[in-house]
Image (spheres, helix red, strand yellow):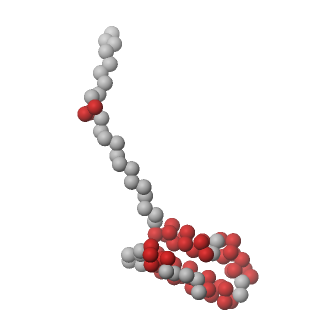
Amino acid sequence: MDMNIILPSITDIPPMPVFTPPTPDTNVLANNYIQLYYPIWKQLNIMRSGTAAQKKMMDTFITSVQAWANGVTPKEPDLQKIKPI
């Protein structure tokens, strides 16, 4: 029985792949931005018992953020310009 173990040489081992962190998805950015101004609990409270003006303001903001996310080339600085009014 042969007890010799043949190990691969350094040149036989492929290099480790370079880790590239994932870039945030546009929809994730949009979701996080909406929740910055309107966390889920606040959205629910406004939908349930908010005034018409509060509902319209929230709806306009969320619709604007969705339009940004669905744009051809959404850029994060443009997202930052969207504010609830």
Q: Position of residue 73 (x, y in %)?
A: 38, 75
The answer to whether any part of residue 59 appears in the image is: no
Q: Quadrant of residue 53?
A: bottom right
Which residue sits at x=63%, y=75%? Answer: 38
Quadrant, the C terminus: bottom right
Which residue sits at x=59%, y=72%? Answer: 36
Quadrant, the N terminus: top left
In this rendering, the answer to whether 3 lies above or below 82 is above
Q: Position of residue 29 (x, y in %)?
A: 50, 69
Q: Position of residue 17 (x, y in %)?
A: 34, 46
Which residue sits at x=32%, y=19%? Answer: 5
Q: Nearer the viewer, residue 67 or 77?
A: 77
Judged left or right of residue 51, residue 74 is left
Q: Position of residue 51 (x, y in %)?
A: 71, 87
Q: In this view, which residue lies farthest toward the top?
A: 1
The answer to whether any part of residue 39 appears in the image is: yes
Judged left or right of residue 8, residue 59 is right
Q: In this view, which residue lies farthest toward the bottom?
A: 53
